[in-house]
Amino acid sequence: MSNLVVDQGNTRTKAAIFEGHDLVEVCTSGNDSALRMVEQLHRKYSAQKGILSSVTHQVEVWDFLQNNISASMQLDAATPLPFHNSYGTPQTLGKDRLAAIAGAFHLKPQHSSLVIDAGTAITYDFIHKNGTYQGGSIAPGLHMRFKALHQFTSKLPLVEADPNLPITGSNTVSSINSGVYFGMLHEIDGFISNYRKYDSDLFVFLTGGDAHIFEKNIKNSIFVAPNLVLSGLNSLLEYNNAE
């Protein structure tokens, strides 16, 4: 049986087909063409189950799932979970954070896991091996840091990340790159090291659009999972439709 999984962000949408827990195909589009992408995937695979996680107020994709897939659901704070959510304000917990934790719990249910999602913001989320999601941290993402230096000063240029530059900047551009890129890299390693003091058996997932910029330079052992959110959504779909 095919599952249609859709993760709709502020500007882009990722959609995937799973057969059970096996990922078959992933597509990405801008939100303006998300409906067409979802329609094409459904036409190709005739999905029997569907799930949507959306941070937008667009209803086209959700209407399509409801009208074409009988076993369809939308992720929200009331969605039943296979783990305990001890977050103090579950209504404010980002759906992408919740889905990523679900993915980590599905892939490594016997381990404590730290999920690092390097996107517009960078988030750190911790789930204990006893099955309790405890919360995490939110910080500005890589490009947000570069933009802040540019927008809140009168002379600093807007710089793109370059992991190949040395840590000691020899001009303004390389100095900004050093401060932002290596600062964030050490932040990531620092979070991992601190959590490993709490749980030495920690498994670390790195996901998000900027994961590839950091993965080779992180000193700690990590597992890069670009489709962790989609896998988590699919695991929640399977959990809520278990026979």
Image (cartoon, helix red, strand yellow):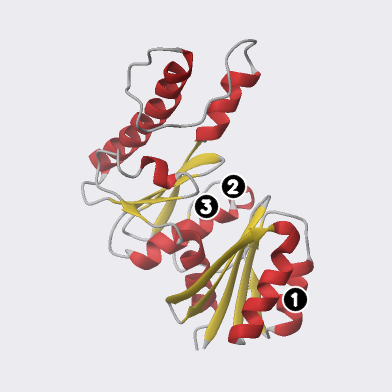
Which mark's residue is nearer the viewer, 3 or 1?
A: 1
Image point (54%, 26%), residue name: 146
Q: Amino acid at mark 1?
A: Phe
Q: Which residue is mark 2?
A: 89
Disc 1 marks which residue? 64
- 86 up-or-down from 234: above or below: above
Q: Secondary structure at mark 1?
A: helix
On the picture, is 144 further left or further right than 118?
A: right
- Label 2 sits on a secondary structure element that is loop
Q: Which of the numbered marks, if any, corresponds to residue 193?
A: none
Q: Residues within 10 Å of mark 3 (few under 14, many from 20)?
A: many
Dot 2 or dot 3, earlier in sequence? 2
Give the residue number, with chain letter if any, for mark 3.
Answer: 97
Q: What residue sits 50% from the left and 48% below the top?
A: 209
Tag 2–tag 3 contact (CB < 8 Å): no
Q: Amino acid at mark 2?
A: Thr
Above or below, comparing residue 7 to residue 126 in the picture:
below
Q: Amino acid at mark 3?
A: Arg
Front tag of 2 and 3: 3
Label 1 crowd bin: few (<14), some (14–19), many (20+), radius 10 Å: some
In this rendering, does residue 161 appear at all?
Answer: yes
Labels 3 and 1 touching (C-beta < 8 A)? no
Distance from disc 3 to disc 1, alpha carbons, whole Å, reads 25 Å
Q: Nearer the viewer, residue 67 or 153?
A: 153
Which tag, 2 or 1, sits closer to the chain's start? 1
- Whole-number angstrom distance, CA of label 2 to CA of label 3: 13 Å
> Of label 3 and label 1, which has the lower sequence position?
1
Image coords of residue 168 (percent x, y): 33, 16
- From the image, state whether disc 2 or disc 1 is nearer to you: 1
